[in-house]
Image (tube, rainbow, N blue to C red):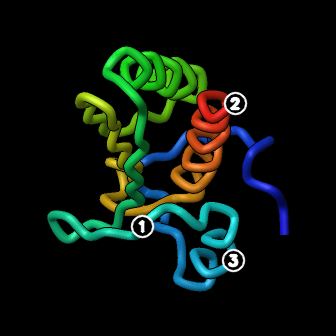
Amino acid sequence: METLLPQTCVPCSGGSPPITEAEIAELQPQIPDWKMIEENGEKRLQRIYKFPDFKQALTFTQKVGEEAEKQGHHPALLTEWGKVTVTWWTHAIQGLHRNDFIMAAKTDAIAAQFAQ
């Protein structure tokens, strides 16, 4: 199994198929703290990160946004005092793509910088 973190997102169009249940089962162990949710009939990955204050939550949000821009794949980010909710899914296919799992792994790596 190829590790998600060093991978880059690939351009995805509306014609790309969503990830299969078998692929989800293969990739999910690499991002064990992420929940699979369904919203508006679409599967999404979501995780809530905790921080000691708003300033660190905001800095984390900025770093996730910068990585999203580099990869050309953007999440829903909800920044609140002491926490940030990150939700990944692929709008073009109204569901999950491998890119979402790659970005979840990259988001975890960003969060790890704050735990030190």
Circle 2: element type: loop
Quarter of the image containing the C terminus?
top right
Task: Please say if 43 is above or below 57.
Answer: below
The label number, if any, that marks residue 116 in the structure image? 2
User: In the rendered view, does 87 fall on the left or right side of 40?
Assistant: right
Q: Is residue 64 above or below residue 14?
A: above
Mark 2 residue type:
Gln
Residue under label 3, please give it: 26
Q: Position of residue 26 (x, y in %)?
A: 69, 77
Residue at 25% across, 35% down: 78
Task: Give the number of the disc on residue 35.
Answer: 1
Residue found at the very far front of the displayed protein:
52
Helix, strand or loop under label 3? helix
Inspect the image, locate mark 3, and give the three-letter code of the amino acid beneath it: Glu
x, y percentage for residue 31? 61, 61
Mark 3 vs mark 2, CA separation in Å: 29 Å
* Count of residue discs: 3
Identify the residue at horizontal 37%, vertical 14% (top origin).
55
Residue type highlighted by circle 1: Lys
Residue 69 disc label: none
Q: Nearer the viewer, mark 3 or mark 2?
A: 2
Labels 1, 3: front one = 1
Q: CB under 8 Å between callouts 1 and 3?
A: no
Q: Mark 3 or mark 2: which comes first in sequence?
A: 3
